[in-house]
Amino acid sequence: MAKLKDDLSRYLRLAAEAEIVITRHGKPAGLLIGFDSEEDWFEYRLEHHPEFLARVAAAREALRQGRGVRLEDIPA
């Protein structure tokens, strides 16, 4: 963590290319993830949002049970 505090801007640039594991006393303490764009940030937030993930799971279950309409079956 000391290295991170001393040179945060450098690590943010590196994190845009690969995740960086932050350690405290040699043990994982966090993960630094960089984003190339605001869209990447939005996608990350969406992919990790518990409410969104629950809705996706519910929709998939409904489709497995035969409820719902496939995109291919919706008239243009």
Image (cartoon, rainbow, N blue to C red):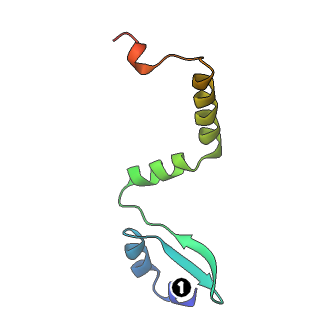
Which residue is depicted at the point 37% across and 9% down? 75
Relative placement, left or right, of 21 versus 24 is left
Which residue is depicted at the point 42% across and 78% down? 9
Q: Quadrant of the C terminus?
A: top left
Relative placement, left or right, of 53 versus 15 is right
Relative placement, left or right, of 62 versus 35 is right
Q: As shown in the figure, which amino acid type bears the numbered disc 1?
A: Lys
Q: Nearer the viewer, residue 67 or 74?
A: 67
Mark 1, Cα crowd under 10 Å, few <14 / some 14-19 / many 20+, is few
Measured as percent of width and height from the top left, residue 67 is found at 60, 17
The image quarter containing residue 74 is top left
Please say if 53 is above or below 7. above
Which residue is depicted at the point 58% across and 85% down? 1
The image quarter containing residue 17 is bottom left
Q: Nearer the viewer, residue 39 or 72?
A: 72
Which residue is depicted at the point 41% across and 61% down? 35
Please say if 38 is above or below 75. below
Total marks shown come to 1
Measured as percent of width and height from the top left, residue 45 is found at 53, 50
Q: Which residue is mark 1?
A: 5
Measured as percent of width and height from the top left, residue 70 is found at 46, 19
Please say if 28 is above or below 56. below
Query: In what element is the residue under mark 1?
Result: helix
